[in-house]
Amino acid sequence: MQRTSKHILIGIGVLAIGAILYFQFFHKSDAPRRADNVQTIHSAVAEKKSIPLTVQANGYVSSITLVEVRPKVQNIVRTVHVKEGQFVKAGQLLFTLDERNDQSNVARTRAELAASQSDLADAELTLKRNQDLAQQNFVSQAVVDTSRARVESLRNAIKANQAAAQSSEIVLGDNQIKASIDGRLGIINVFPGTLAQPSGDPMVTITQLDPIAVTFALPERELLNVVNTYPNADAPVTVQLPGQPPIQGKLFFIDNMSDSQSGTIRMKARFDNKAQKLWPGGFVNVSMVTRQVDDAVTVPAQAVVTGPTDKFVYVIQEDATVKDVKVTVLAIENGQAVVTGISGGVRVVVEGAQNLRPGSKVKESTAKPAPASAMPEDNT
């Protein structure tokens, strides 16, 4: 029993010594801080202004027109008139196929047409002669009718021969394969002596480079903003290439349905590409203005604090204390957050919010504020 009492007394003594040490070292060091509980901050005034809202997306460059050159019928390539990577104009000769068989067909159809025309001329003379003889009662009316029928038959035969000759000339012309658009040639897959076929790999592809398109996808919630702001679907679109100035273009296509899996909708923008900075298949960063927000309240994006459940800002009161005010972030544009929940003209804390609590007293720092870090856009 005495040993237990001794242990209790030792424990009480240890606690007493610990309490004395705490008040000597910690409580005394807190005393000055409590006496001057003013936090140093940087602040800014919430502005009210009209601001265009943009959305960012990843896109890829695609040709507006891409032509795969193939022959209508299989034939042997006789001559290749162009080189890989060459720029061609519409109507420029690309390939010549073996045309000897088609030339003979053209000659045959022309000869048949000439023979039919000669037969028709003779039949018309016979008809006129029989008509004269019938008026003199030297031949019957049946002979005249037979001559007239022969003339009509030969006239129809001439029409058929003319169509056959025209068709054979078209087939002959198909042996000269020409470019249908202006553009740049890709890899040439045939050579003199190659059997070119309508199926299989194309002889060559022609890609239009100017103008050119950029395909990208936006969240489907932005569709209504785009349609309401730009009824003609001609919204300005900007493409940014590494180390290059922005390239300006215009929207010209919105897909007729959205992707139910990703919740996005495809769009295309047209860009002038005389300098050929945009190349088909390349990936680019795309930004597009979707709407204009009038009388928007903006604060520096750094001022918005993300809490456990909501986002808020610290608003500085007249007595130099702060109050947390819940806000909704509509978008972040060029380091400025477009918010609802506060009015323009109020002063908010930009730097130093991590040390604040509602009711904390603050004072403006005289030091230069740190530069704002790049904030990702949040067009929600």
Image (tube, grey):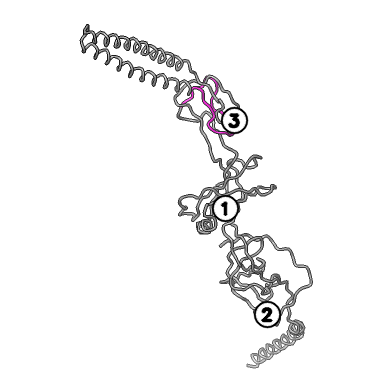
Question: Disc 3 designates what residue?
Answer: 88
N-term mark: 3 or 2: 3
Tag 1: amino acid: Ala
Q: Residue furthest front?
A: 136
* Badge 3 or badge 1: first in the primary sequence: 3
The magenta region covers 175-197
Q: Is residue 212 left or right of residue 353?
A: left
Tell me where residue 66 appears, x and y as whole percent.
Answer: 53, 37
Is residue 298 depicted above or below 63 in this figure?
below
Question: Alpha carbon of mark 3 to alpha carbon of mark 1: how far?
Answer: 32 Å
Q: Disc 1 on helix, strand or loop?
A: loop
Judge depth for marks 3 and 2 and give the one in front.
3
Q: CA distance from mark 2 to mark 1?
A: 42 Å
* Image coords of residue 307 (percent x, y): 60, 71
337 in relation to 364, above or below: above
Which residue is at the front of the view, 239 or 248? 248
Dot 2 alpha-carbon crowd within 10 angstroms: few under 14, some 14 to 19, many 20 or more: some
Q: Quadrant of the C terminus?
A: bottom right
**Left or right: where does residue 366 sit relative to residue 268?**
right
Quadrant of the rendering where the N terminus is positioned? bottom right
The residue beneath circle 2 is 317
Magenta stretch: residue 336 in it?
A: no
Badge 3 crowding class, 10 Å Cα cut-off, few under 14, some 14 to 19, many 20 or more, is many
Q: Which mark is residue 235?
A: 1
